[in-house]
Image (tube, rainbow, N blue to C red):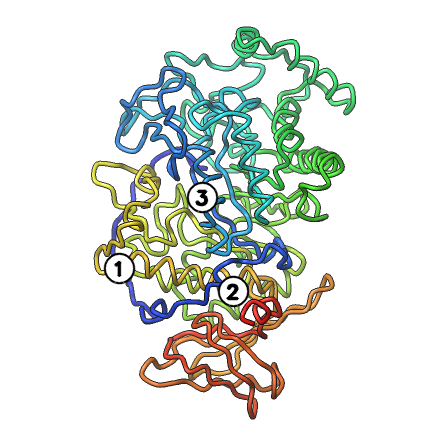
Amino acid sequence: MKLIAFRFSLALLLSTILFPSTWANETVQSNSQQASVASPFLWENATVYFLLTDRFYQQSPATAHAYGRLQDGAPLRSFMGGNLAGITAKIKQGYFQKLGVNVIWLTPPVEQIHGATDEGSGKTYGFHGYWSADFTQVDAALGTSNDMRELVETAHAHGIRILLDVVLNHVGPATNVDPLWPAAWVRTEPVCTYKDIPSTVSCALVKGLPDIRTENNDNVDLPPALVAKWKAEGRYETEVQELDTFFKRTGYPRAPRYYLMKWHTDWIRKYGVDGFRADTVKHVEPDVWKEFKQVASSAYEEWKQQHPAQKLGNEPFYMTAEVYGYGLNQGLNFVMDGGSKINFFEHGFDSLINFGFKSDAKKDPDALFSSYSKKLQGELQHHSILNYISSHDDMQPFDVNRQSALEAGTKLLLSPGAAQIYYGDETARDIHVNGAEGDATLRSMMNWDELQNNVSRNGIDIQEVLTHWQKLGMFRHDHVAIGAGSHQKLSDHPYTFQRTYQDHGISDKVVVALNLPTNDVNTISVAGIFDNGQTLRDYYSGNTAVVIDGKVNFQSKSAIALIAQENRNQKDEKN
């Protein structure tokens, strides 16, 4: 995460909507509105919902003033009241399942600095989760350890994995109430200049942000402020005993990075989180991440053995990396500042966040899909990427004005690779907030009121957008071929393609047609993919058809068709 607000131009993106809004007019039958927990899961095809807990939904009474924090931050820079219980409530309501989401990415829920910084745009609190003060417990503004436990257990019960955001690079800045960590733990200078690896790694990311000395192998004592805090809370002896056990078992020196590895992996042992999204990866020595993955994997296997009824599968612990600036076109090797190349896939990461997708999504669909499939089925085979159209600190998203929300959903959710939905992408949440500056405007409150009141904003029907994303998301959820399969174009007019997947004991194939005429019933060729006599379903309109002479006709006037063999369970439910 970049903690500095960037100046950016609000130059209007060409918002040519390639796909007519009539797509969202037809409803999917209720039995396909609920994504099946039993559907095969592959991280390569994951649909990840990324949210800022404080900005998503408030269920229990707000505790935004925890630790004496005030509501005196600059616009959208104070705690706003969203909490862990709110996420749990939305899981129970089926919000994520109807969207086809099978992974929720949480910003760090750890206790943040109590005070605020006061530079640039005004006071800023650590509502985002990246300014840690104590890695060992939940920030009281977000809830309690019981809230965290219930969240993970509820997610698992609904077939959803939890991806936890973790930070090894830095701790929270010093404020008038938060002391600076000891010099043996952190440095505040030099500030990174990005000329080479040392000036990217052994430096403070921005002025005033304490950089953890992850290269240090010397034993260091606990920060005095943390000791005093734990003693005041009556848990000092317990925390120290756990640390003693960890260091004795591993043989690691009591160096800063190993304390953090212990504290972060405790969230696996205590709650059963299924993966980590690692923050500011290129600002930490690559070998540290490799060590970290080993510690995390061990903790995950330990948790699974102790909680066999709660685990969702037997796949190993998962880690995805925020290597700022990485794009799919770079393949396996990321070019670091100064020109050095690093293969982060060989340093503990199963996937990398794809910063290039927001630009690549401006291509026509086949150019986008074909190039991504070629790369993922070639140089990056057995590796993965995480695509996104908007994020919490990317000032140049694909659709900054939220005028192309249907196109954005189509391209994101049908592209090869894993998909990251940033909260509100699926509801065209407004990211132009009067008075908010820099990345704060990307972090507005989730627009539940607009959704509830069927609001249209700037000609965009919010409910129509959500329905469109739901149909695509559920199809993706139930068909691993979308994100993990091979892509092949079948026709230019209408643009039709197939995706096929055959591995890990899973066989899956789909056909998708885009840009269909909406003024007539369309006939779509599926010859060579599905056999005559097979019953297929269009998971966009909900209609079924039998293959005759290699073609299907779904009696639908939608501009899109999502075609696959009808699910056996759906047949039973219909009957």
- Front-most of residues 192 and 226: 226
Task: Find disc 2 in the rendering and name its residue.
Answer: 475
Task: Find disc 1 in the rendering and name its residue.
Answer: 460
- The residue drawn where x is 63% and y is 57% is 38
**Label 3 vs 1, first from the N-terminus:** 3
Where residue 431 sits in the image (x, y, percent)?
Answer: 30, 46
- The residue drawn where x is 73% and y is 41% is 308
Query: How many residues crowd mark 1 within 10 Å: few (<14), some (14–19), many (20+)?
Result: some
Where residue 257 sits in the image (x, y, percent)?
Answer: 63, 25
Q: CA distance from mark 2 to mark 1?
A: 23 Å
**Label 2 vs 1, first from the N-terminus:** 1
Hey, what amino acid is under mark 2?
Answer: Phe
Hey, what amino acid is under mark 3?
Answer: Lys
Query: How many residues crowd mark 2 within 10 Å: few (<14), some (14–19), many (20+)?
Result: many
Disc marking residue 364: none
Find numbered disc 3 in the image and state the secondary structure of the residue it sits on: helix
Where residue 266 sits in the image (x, y, percent)?
Answer: 64, 28
Please name which of the two marks, 3 or 1, marks the residue nearer to the observer.
3
- Front-most of residues 339 and 211: 211
Query: How many residues crowd mark 3 within 10 Å: few (<14), some (14–19), many (20+)?
Result: some
Task: Tell me which corner region of the image, top left, top right, bottom left or bottom right, holds residue 408.
Answer: bottom left
Horizontal arrangement in the rendering, residue 306 relative to residue 469 (left or right): right
Task: Find disc 3 in the rendering and name its residue.
Answer: 90
Hey, what amino acid is under mark 1?
Answer: Ile
Which image quarter is the C terminus in?
A: bottom right
Above or below residue 250? Residue 350 is below
Find numbered disc 2 in the image and state the secondary structure of the residue it sits on: helix
